[in-house]
Image (cartoon, helix red, strand yellow):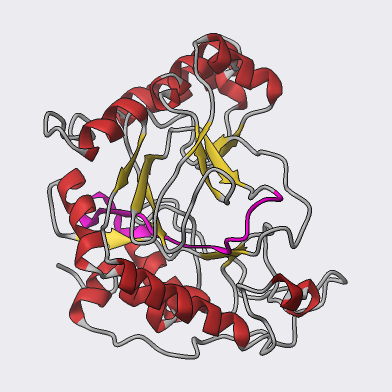
């Protein structure tokens, strides 16, 4: 047997062993859980109150004002891209220890945010991702072209991760919001099996789709749609669902403000993953969207265009969160 066939055989064997029966979504409730299973995404309306959403958005704005005191996110005439903190991919903030700011942790621990994930996974013993803040000021930069992707490696089959967005701003048809391809979560495995070579699959939990790839899904009658939501809504999606961050149109005046947060049962995390998660927490670092696996410390430093470290770099939050037992358990630092 050739070395390539051996490699393919090993990969397919790993795929078979990664299918776990309890990675199944609860259905038959007549609510958002049915949508999540059928469409690969769902909107949990009013997970937190509009007042709390406004509070967390204001805290996000105050955080930005520590870089640019003159910035008023609701007044485009005050926008100055040169004064804003560095963004890795144009719209999310993960440096400057923002991931561990007090308001970020308080939002993650809101009962109305935790409850849907507890219902999805059937347990309150959860871990949370050390995920980023997104404040997209409308029309500050040229619109980015779509970047369809999933956040689950082709070798992993079945449901492994549910991602989340804590929505803090109005997301209408003209505004920035998550874009999904409903139903794609049920077809990605077929796509990989029929249209790709297993020996070329990467091991990271991320896979982008080019225009040619997307023709497969279009041929199955699927098409992208922007998720509409209000302040306080929670957007959930299966990591196998093709998605990207939808840009605001020129008509939008809304500063998109969201916190990314994903939760998974602590029992799914390996000993090594827990140890790495604790290490990342200790240095106020950010990770991927995954709370229990694929734990990788993102670069702690923000870099200027010339490659030097931003002198405004911070290694600790401005407002430290209270390290309660609940927070430490969600962080993977304290055992349940």
> Residue 262 lies in magenta, yes or no?
yes
Q: Give x and y (percent) for residue 70.
A: 69, 87
* Image position of 284 with respect to 6: above or below: below
Q: Give x and y (percent) for residue 16.
A: 33, 22
Q: Give x and y (percent) for residue 223.
A: 53, 22
* Image position of 80 with respect to 40: above or below: below
Is residue 272 found left or right of 110 in the rendered image?
right
Question: Is residue 72 visible in this depiction of the protein?
Answer: yes
Is residue 97 found left or right of 41 in the rendered image?
right
Give, as a single range, the part of the protein colored magenta. Answer: 250-273
Is residue 136 found left or right of 170 in the rendered image?
right
Question: Is residue 6 visible in this depiction of the protein?
Answer: no
* In-front residue for pair 282/88: 88
* In-front residue for pair 229/128: 229
Tell me where residue 202 sits by quadrant: top right
User: Which residue is painted at 33% across and 53% down in the image?
Assistant: 234
Tell me where residue 83 sits by quadrant: bottom right
User: Which residue is painted at 56% across and 9% down in the image?
Assistant: 219
Is residue 209 found left or right of 113 in the rendered image?
right
């Amino acid at each position: 047997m050739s070395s390539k066939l051996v490699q393919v055989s090993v990969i397919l064997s790993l795929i078979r062993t990664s299918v776990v029966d309890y990675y199944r979504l609860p259905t038959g409730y007549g609510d958002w859980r049915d949508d999540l299973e059928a469409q690969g995404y769902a909107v949990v309306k009013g997970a937190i109150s509009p007042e709390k959403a406004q509070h967390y958005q204001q805290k996000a704005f105050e955080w930005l004002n520590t870089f640019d005191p003159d910035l008023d996110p609701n007044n485009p005439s005050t926008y100055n891209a040169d004064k804003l903190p560095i963004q890795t991919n144009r719209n999310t903030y993960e440096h400057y220890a923002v991931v561990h700011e007090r308001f970020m942790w308080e939002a993650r621990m809101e009962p109305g945010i935790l409850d849907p994930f507890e219902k999805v996974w059937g347990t309150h013993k959860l871990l949370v991702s050390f995920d980023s803040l997104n404040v997209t000021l409308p029309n500050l930069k040229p619109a980015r072209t779509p970047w369809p992707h999933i956040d689950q490696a082709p070798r992993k089959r079945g449901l492994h991760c549910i991602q989340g967005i804590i929505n803090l701003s109005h997301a209408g048809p003209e505004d920035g919001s998550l874009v999904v391809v409903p139903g794609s979560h049920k077809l990605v495995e077929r796509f990989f099996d029929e249209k790709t070579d297993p020996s070329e699959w990467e091991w990271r939990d991320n896979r982008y789709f080019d225009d040619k790839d997307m023709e497969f899904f279009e041929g199955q009658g699927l098409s992208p749609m922007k998720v509409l939501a209000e302040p306080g809504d929670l957007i959930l999606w299966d990591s196998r669902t093709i998605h990207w961050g939808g840009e605001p149109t020129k008509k939008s005046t809304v500063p998109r403000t969201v916190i990314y947060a994903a939760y998974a049962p602590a029992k799914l995390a390996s000993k090594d993953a827990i140890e790495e998660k604790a290490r990342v927490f200790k240095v106020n670092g950010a990770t991927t969207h995954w709370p229990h696996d694929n734990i990788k410390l993102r670069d702690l430093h923000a870099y200027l265009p010339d490659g030097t470290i931003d002198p405004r770099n911070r290694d600790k939050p401005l407002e430290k969160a209270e390290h309660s037992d609940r927070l430490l358990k969600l962080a993977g630092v304290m055992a349940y």
